[in-house]
Amino acid sequence: MSERVTIEEVCARLNARASDVVARIIPSNGRRPERGGKIWALNPKRTDPSWNSFVIYVRNGVWCDYSNAAHDKGDMFKFVAQFACNGDKKRAFKWALDFLGLTGQPPDPAETQKIAENRARLEAEEAARLAGKRKFC
């Protein structure tokens, strides 16, 4: 990459591709289809089975977790940092550059593996939750 990309530009590009970012980080069984410019999802950092507290507003690339008093929220860069890179903003910036195709390099295999493992864990938790629910029906 010959030109330096600013964090503002990366944030704007991630926000414009909010649906793609969410699809990369939250497994399909952990999110509902986009409807009315919103994606309701299970929070990737909690085992809370509530579909009513974590929402991504796709049109402007903002997410909000309504399950706590602080109402954690942010843009897609903060989403990547918090849910794909455990709060590490340097890793999130590199992830975003790779995701947006601004490095000319494929995504880091180790980072891809971590995200895949997180997705698998969420899918297993959801399957176990659903299996437990079926026992009582």
Image (tube, rainbow, N blue to C red):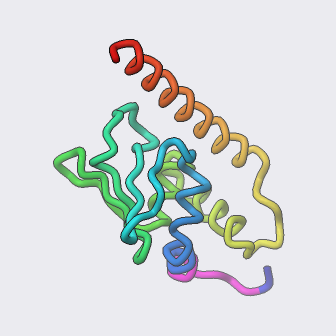
Residue reaching furthest front? Answer: 137
Residue 103 position (above or below residue 27): below
Answer left or right for 37 relative to 69: right
> Toward which corner of the image does residue 38 lie, by quadrant?
bottom left
At x 41% / y 49%, what residue is drawn? 41
Stretch of the chain drawn in magenta:
3-10
Q: Is residue 4 magenta?
A: yes
At x 52% / y 78%, what residue is drawn? 16
Residue 14 position (above or below residue 91): below
- Which is nearer the eye, 16 or 88? 16
| Rendered location of residue 54, percent (x, y) | 33, 51
Answer left or right for 137 relative to 19: left
Q: Which image quadrant: the N terminus?
A: bottom right
Residue reaching furthest top? Answer: 135
At x 46% / y 58%, what residue is drawn? 79
Q: Which image quadrant: the C terminus?
A: top left
| Rendered location of residue 75, percent (x, y) | 42, 68
| Rendered location of residue 18, percent (x, y) | 51, 68
> Toward which corner of the image does residue 99 lie, by quadrant?
bottom right
At x 53% / y 48%, what residue is drawn? 26
- Which is nearer the eye, 73 or 86? 73
| Rendered location of residue 35, percent (x, y) | 40, 65
Q: Is residue 83 magenta?
A: no
> Toward which corner of the image does residue 104 lie, by quadrant?
bottom right
Residue 1 position (above or below residue 66): below
